[in-house]
Image (cartoon, rainbow, N blue to C red):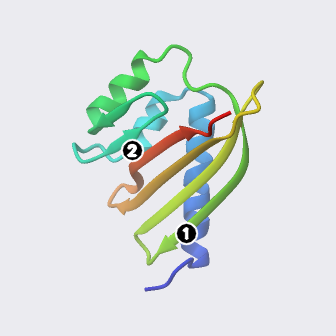
Amino acid sequence: MIVDDPAVLAELGEALDRYEAALMGNDIATLDALFWQAPQTRRFGVAENLYGFAAIAAYRRARPGGAPPRTVLRRAITTFGQDFASADLEFEPIGSDRIGRQTQCWVRTPDGWRIVSAHVSMMAG
């Protein structure tokens, strides 16, 4: 197994850029497309635990205005072979001095890279 193959890292970097743009633009269709649409998909947020794609999609549609704007401070990607990767991000919400953290597990599917598990948290401030 090759760890951090440059071509796979580039693919994941593009997927993460697409995710961040969709998150900041509240582009729900793209966010939905980037998550694996299966009952096994999970997203643990700052105040919610969502099990299954349907719960994640419903949460997004019920959240007025989408995610708060943020500045990405650091991003780290590790790929394992051609089909699995983890991505970690540190961010700062605009107007706040708290630090947030985001972790995503990505899997290559026949339709492209998809998030299968995600976790967002804020450090105590």
Residue highlighted by disc 1: 78
Q: Quadrant of residue 83?
A: bottom left
Q: Position of residue 77 (x, y in %)?
A: 58, 64
Q: Position of residue 26 (x, y in %)?
A: 56, 26
Q: Foreground mark, 2 or 1?
A: 1
Query: What amino acid is at disc 1?
Result: Thr
* In this picture, residue 65 sits left or right of residue 29: right
Q: Is residue 105 above or below residue 26?
A: below
Q: Is residue 27 above or below residue 104?
A: above
- Alpha carbon separation for disc pair 2 and 1: 18 Å
User: Camera-side residue: 83 or 105?
Assistant: 105
Q: Is residue 12 above or below residue 52?
A: below
User: Camera-side residue: 81 or 78?
Assistant: 78
Q: What residue is rendered at 68% in x and 40% in y? A: 99
Query: What amino acid is at disc 2?
Result: Phe
Seen as rendered, the residue at the extreme top is: 64
Q: What residue is rendered at 78% in x and 24% in y? A: 95
Q: Position of residue 51 (x, y in %)?
A: 27, 38
The crowd level at tag 1 (other Cα within 10 Å; few <14, some 14-19, many 20+) is some
The crowd level at tag 2 (other Cα within 10 Å; few <14, some 14-19, many 20+) is many
Q: Position of residue 63 (x, y in %)?
A: 46, 18
* In this picture, residue 84 sits left or right of residue 122: left
- Secondary structure of the residue carrying tag 2 is loop
- Secondary structure of the residue carrying tag 1 is strand
Contact flag, marks 2 and 1 (Cβ < 8 Å): no
- The quarter of the image holding the C terminus is top right
Q: What residue is rendered at 71% in x and 37% in y? A: 92
Q: What residue is rendered at 40% in x and 39% in y? A: 44
- The quarter of the image holding the N terminus is bottom left
Q: Quadrant of residue 67?
A: top right
* In this picture, residue 47 sits left or right of residue 8: left
Residue 35, label in figure: 2
